[in-house]
Image (cartoon, rainbow, N blue to C red):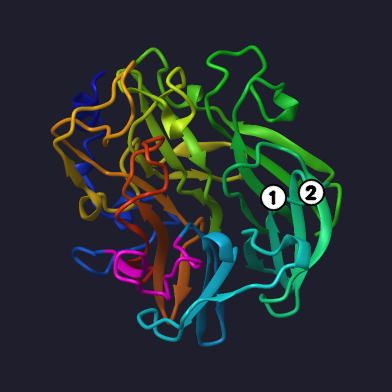
C-alpha cells in the first residue's frame, strides 16, 4: 500500500473531530458545537506561553483542575517540566518550572493528583536512576524523590494514574525491541522493533512495583503486517472516562515504501521507515483488553496541521535533509495528553503538535511546536 493509498484507506477526512469518534461509544463526549476547532495555547511560533531559548515547547505532561484554576504541565527543554495556569481555559500565566531534587533538575516528569501530588518519569544524567522514578509533592511544584518503580522501555511518555476500579496505581508505557516479553520486548517474534503497549501496576505509591509489566496491545493483533503500511503504538495515552478505560494512543503509520537514511544524523547506513503520527481511539472494560473504536480514524482534527511540501523524499541511499513527502500533504506529529479534562462544565483534550515527520532531519528544528486545546463540548 502506497502512502497515497494509505490516506484513502484511513479516510481521515470523514472525521475531523474527536467527539464524532465516540458517538454511541458509551463513555464518549457529546459535542455541542457543529465544528469544534483546536486553539493554540502555547507555541514557539508566536512566543506564547513565555517561549524562550530555555523554555521551549514540548509534550503535555499533566493537566489538573485545582478549585477554579486549570493547571497544565509540559516538557520545556532545559527547563525540565514547567506549568501554566488559567481560570477560563483561554488566558494563561507565564510558565514556571517545577522543582526536583538538585541533581535531577532539568529533567521532565509527568504530574497528576491522587491523595496528594504525584510525579513520575525517567531521570537522565544521574547515576543509578535508570527506569521509572517516583516523586511526591505538597503543592505540585516542589517534588521529593520516592524511589525506583520498575524498568521497561523508557523513551516515551507514560500514562500514570490511580485506578479506582482495580484499586491500584497503573502505568501504561511502550514496548519495543528484541528483549524478552518479560523485559518489554518481543523476543524472537518478528518484526522485533515494532511498538506495543504495556501495563504496570502497584497498590501503593512506593518503590519496587509488585506488577512490573505485561504486554497488553501488540500492533500485529490490530493490523495486517503483510501490508506496506505497518501501524505501531507510540505513546499509549490511557485514562479512565466514566465507566471504562479509554486511550488515544499516538500511532506511527510506518510505510514500507518510505525509507529514510541518515535519520537524525546517525550515519549514511542508518535507515528508518517514516509516516504520519496521529492518535486513534481505543476502549476497554478492564484496562487490559482494548478494542479499536473507529478503526484508523484520527482522534483530533488533522486539517489544521497539514503542511505541503514540494521536496522529493530522501529515499534509501540519499541524505535525509528535506521533508519526506513528495507533492503531498503531511500531517507531522500529534501527541495528545492522555486524559479528557472537565473544567467549568466543558470537556477538553490537550495535545502537542510538531510539524516534522518522524525521523526527519534536522531533528527538532521545526517551524511549529505547539500545545493545542480541543473543546469537546458538554457530556450528556
- SS for dot 1: loop
Do the numbered discs 1 and 2 sit on residues whose CB atoms are within 8 Å?
A: yes
Image quadrant holding the N terminus, namely: top left
Query: Residue at left 47%, top 68%?
Result: 341
Residue 124 numbered tag: 1
Spot occupied by residue 195 in the image (x, y as percentages of width and height): 53, 30
Image quadrant holding the C terminus, namely: bottom left
Q: Which residue carries the number 2 mark?
A: 129
Q: Is the magenta region chiefly helix, strand or loop?
A: loop
Instruction: Classify 10 Å Cα crowding around label 1: few (below 14), some (14-19), many (20 and above).
Output: some
One can see residue 243 in this view? no
Query: Residue at left 29%, top 70%?
Result: 46
The question of residue 116 being in magenta is answered with: no
Q: On screen, 177 above or below 135?
A: above
Spot occupied by residue 200 in the image (x, y as percentages of width and height): 71, 43
Spot occupied by residue 18 in the image (x, y as percentages of width and height): 33, 54
- Residue 151 is left or right of residue 96, and the answer is right
Amino acid at each position: 500500500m502506497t502512502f497515497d493509498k494509505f490516506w484513502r484507506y484511513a479516510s481521515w477526512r470523514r472525521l475531523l473531530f474527536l467527539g464524532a469518534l465516540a458517538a454511541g461509544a458509551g463513555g464518549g463526549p457529546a459535542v455541542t458545537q457543529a465544528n469544534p476547532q483546536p486553539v493554540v495555547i502555547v507555541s514557539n511560533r508566536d512566543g506564547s506561553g513565555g517561549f524562550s531559548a530555555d523554555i521551549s515547547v514540548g509534550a503535555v505532561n499533566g493537566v489538573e483542575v485545582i478549585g477554579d484554576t486549570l493547571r497544565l504541565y509540559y516538557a520545556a527543554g532545559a527547563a525540565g517540566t514547567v506549568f501554566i495556569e488559567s481560570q477560563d481555559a483561554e488566558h494563561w500565566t507565564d510558565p514556571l518550572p517545577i522543582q526536583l531534587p538538585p541533581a535531577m533538575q532539568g529533567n521532565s516528569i509527568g504530574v497528576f493528583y491522587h491523595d496528594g501530588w504525584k510525579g513520575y518519569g525517567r531521570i537522565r544524567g544521574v547515576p543509578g536512576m535508570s527506569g521509572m522514578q517516583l516523586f511526591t509533592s505538597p503543592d505540585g511544584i516542589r517534588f521529593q524523590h520516592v524511589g525506583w518503580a520498575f524498568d521497561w522501555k523508557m523513551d516515551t511518555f507514560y500514562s500514570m494514574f490511580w485506578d479506582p476500579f482495580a484499586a491500584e496505581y497503573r502505568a501504561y508505557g511502550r514496548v519495543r525491541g528484541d528483549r524478552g516479553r518479560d523485559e518489554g520486548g518481543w523476543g524472537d517474534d518478528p518484526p522485533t522493533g515494532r511498538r506495543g503497549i504495556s501495563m504496570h501496576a502497584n497498590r501503593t505509591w512506593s518503590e519496587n512495583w509488585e506488577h512490573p509489566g505485561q504486554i497488553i496491545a501488540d500492533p500485529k493483533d490490530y493490523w495486517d503486517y503483510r501490508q506496506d503500511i505497518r501501524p505501531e503504538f507510540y505513546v499509549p495515552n490511557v485514562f479512565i472516562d466514566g465507566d471504562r478505560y479509554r486511550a488515544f494512543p499516538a500511532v506511527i503509520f510506518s510505510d514500507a515504501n518510505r525509507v529514510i537514511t541518515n535519520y537524525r544524523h546517525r550515519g549514511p547506513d542508518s535507515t528508518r521507515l517514516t509516516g504520519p503520527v496521529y492518535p486513534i481511539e481505543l476502549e476497554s472494560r478492564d484496562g487490559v483488553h482494548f478494542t479499536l473504536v473507529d478503526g484508523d480514524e484520527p482522534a483530533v482534527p488533522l486539517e489544521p496541521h497539514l503542511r505541503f511540501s514540494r521536496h522529493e523524499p530522501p529515499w534509501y541511499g540519499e541524505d535525509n535533509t528535506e521533508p519526506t513527502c513528495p507533492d503531498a500533504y503531511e500531517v507531522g506529529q500529534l501527541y495528545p495528553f492522555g486524559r479528557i479534562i472537565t473544567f467549568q462544565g466543558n470537556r477538553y483534550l490537550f495535545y502537542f503538535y510538531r510539524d516534522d515527520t518522524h525521523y526527519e532531519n534536522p531533528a527538532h528544528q521545526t517551524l511549529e511546536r505547539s500545545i493545542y486545546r480541543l473543546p469537546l463540548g458538554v457530556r450528556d
